Amino acid sequence: MISPLLLSLPLALLQAPEQRPGLVMIPGGNTVIGADLESTIERIHEMPASAGVLAGEYPRGSVMVDTFYMSPTLVTNEMYLEFVNATGAMPPPAWAVISKERRAELIQAGKEEFGPGYKFDDETRARWWINHWQDEGQRWEMSPSIALEPVVSISFMQAQAYCTWAGLRPPTEPEWTRAARGDTDFDYPYGPEFDRTKVSHNATKPSQLAYKLLPVCALDNASPYGIYDLVGLVHEYTDSRATKPEGWKSFSVDFLDDRGKVENTIYPAPTWDSSRILIKGGSYRNQGVNCRIDTRIGYERDAAVSIIGFRVVASALPVKDSAYLHSQRLRSNVLGGTPTSILNFNRAIGVEKHSYADMAQVASNRAAHEDVKEINLPNTYAVFGPHTSLSLTPIKDPFLVHKHLKLTQIDRAIKKSRQLVAVAALYTDVSFADIDLSPGAYSVVYMPGLKVKDLEEWGGWVKGTERPVIEEEVVVEDEETKDDKKKKKKEEVEEIKPSVDISGVELIPSKRHLLFVDNEGVARAALPVIGNPAYGRENKVPNQITFREAKGKQTAAIEFEFKLPSRSGNCYGFKFAVTPVDDNGNDLSSPAAWNPQ
């Protein structure tokens, strides 16, 4: 964990620590990704029915992956239990407590509705559980014997909710591949050749472990970085979309008869669908050829089956992951674009606090597994607790629309159009002593300094005055108002409303402000920009936070300084300060308040 004290330094000076609790550092580097054409054609010959899926693994290339951290195992049932207990999220279907009598009733009801072939298997159980887990009298319990099995039958959306709670995220496909392959071009995390004893699949050796959901780390199959079960066991969610790989080209596959003549030619056509996410690695129900690093399948984000699980990763930059996940709550029409596209997460700044369960207590709640009696967990294994953060993420280029003019010129343009400009996103799990802003995600909108008269015309609330009463205009229709000329005149003089409702926040005349705006376009809080906004070369404008100590009349606070691009390598810089507090009003403006538990 990067100490919050270091966050007062520019991001460029921060160094990734070698270890973080519950995670393993995966050093960055060029990574081989995808399958070569020759191998792809060979596999299609073996499994022609899977030609479309296999063709989607091609071509082989190389990508640069930055340093990041990954959990050494898949998220286990005992890890997910912490999340369910803390948030009230839906427990996985495997935890449902269903008596023999109740199960018989469900099977009979299913046969009456769907026919005699109906089975109450893992998938039908999951569909039933989604609709009935909150029924009166329905119970659930995580059996101690499956504590170390990977959690399954949860959707990507549920997995992402877990990640958001823990301050982590699902890996991208390049990150997942980097953790599995390292600097090699092997097909398997443990080496170049398939080994039945190292992969949980439909023919695992010894045979009593085949075609079964095993605990994590049941087999000796660690990657070069000490990451287990990356192939086999269960498919794993990534945060990458099922889109066409760069460089993919159509190709043909010839099938020969016994005499070596072409009997049939096919042209494999993968299905690309950006609404789907990629799953990797194969599962315990697959044959060995499906349990490779390059296996990639598109899957629905809101579907869930018993052969898909997930693991978690963290970026080297602090608060980046939390900012990324929480920003997705924001509406594009307020922020000015899709959050994941227009926000610069590499410049996210702020503070965060990770927490962890007591491992001695967690271990005491386990029981022996039915099939694997001894499980050697790596010392990097941990059970995550809730995460707390306060972050600001700049928009990549908000003033491009104003052609990167001087800020005084941009101010004049905004005053004339009344179209305010979103410049960042803010997320907070905590409240503030100095502004009335509830925890949540907000668009941060820049507002130029306005004179009292202009503020009043915009419907603003001038600091030190009573809050204005906004009355709805009532138009009484009569012959005069129906007159075409008077209608036209009224339309010409009709006031242009500002793009943000500023009626509920106090504003200081002639002072530039940052507005914290909700998804309805309503400013919920406003803070004056400290000093004059900076303008200078990229390396001269800070992008950092500083812990400000209380001194004289100055209160303790966290000062945010962030920069936005301008022309010719220059940047605009803005500064503001907040005093975060906990639920009891205790100050959280010191580094010690954010130390990990």
Image: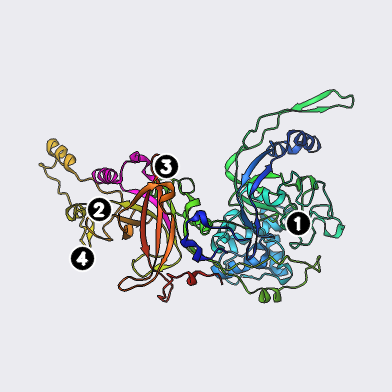
Q: Name the residue under label 2.
A: 449
Amino acid marked by disc 1: Ala
Amino acid marked by disc 3: Gly
Q: What element carries label 1?
A: loop
Q: Closest to the observer: 162 or 538?
A: 538
Q: Name the spot of residue 82 as percent of width and height, x first.
A: 60, 69
Q: Which of marks 1 and 4 is nearer the N terminus?
A: 1
Measure how far apart labels 1 and 3 are at the Cα level: 45 Å
Amino acid marked by disc 4: Gly
Q: In this view, does 147 lie to the left or right of 300?
A: right
Q: Which residue is drawn at 86% across and 26% down?
A: 257
Q: Closest to the observer: 157 or 109?
A: 157
The magenta-colored residue range is 397-426
Q: Residue at x 20, y 57 (%)?
A: 471
Q: Which of marks 2 and 1 is nearer the N terminus?
A: 1
Please check the rendered image and state whether residue 410 is part of the magenta-colored stretch, yes or no.
Answer: yes
Measure how far apart labels 1 and 4 are at the Cα level: 64 Å
Measure how far apart labels 2 and 1 are at the Cα level: 59 Å
Q: Earlier in the sequence, mark 4 or mark 3?
A: 4
Q: Which label number is shown at residue 569?
A: 3
Q: Mark 1 points at which residue?
A: 222
Q: Earlier in the sequence, mark 1 or mark 3?
A: 1
Q: Is residue 67 left or right of residue 188?
A: left
Considering only vertical position in the picture, is 482 above or below 251? below
Q: Which of marks 1 and 3 is in front?
A: 3
Q: Is mark 4 on a helix, strand or loop?
A: loop
Measure how far apart labels 4 and 3 are at the Cα level: 41 Å
Please check the rendered image and state whether residue 313 is part of the magenta-colored stretch, yes or no.
Answer: no
**Residue 425 found in image quarter:** bottom left
Amino acid marked by disc 2: Gly
Q: Is mark 2 on a helix, strand or loop?
A: loop
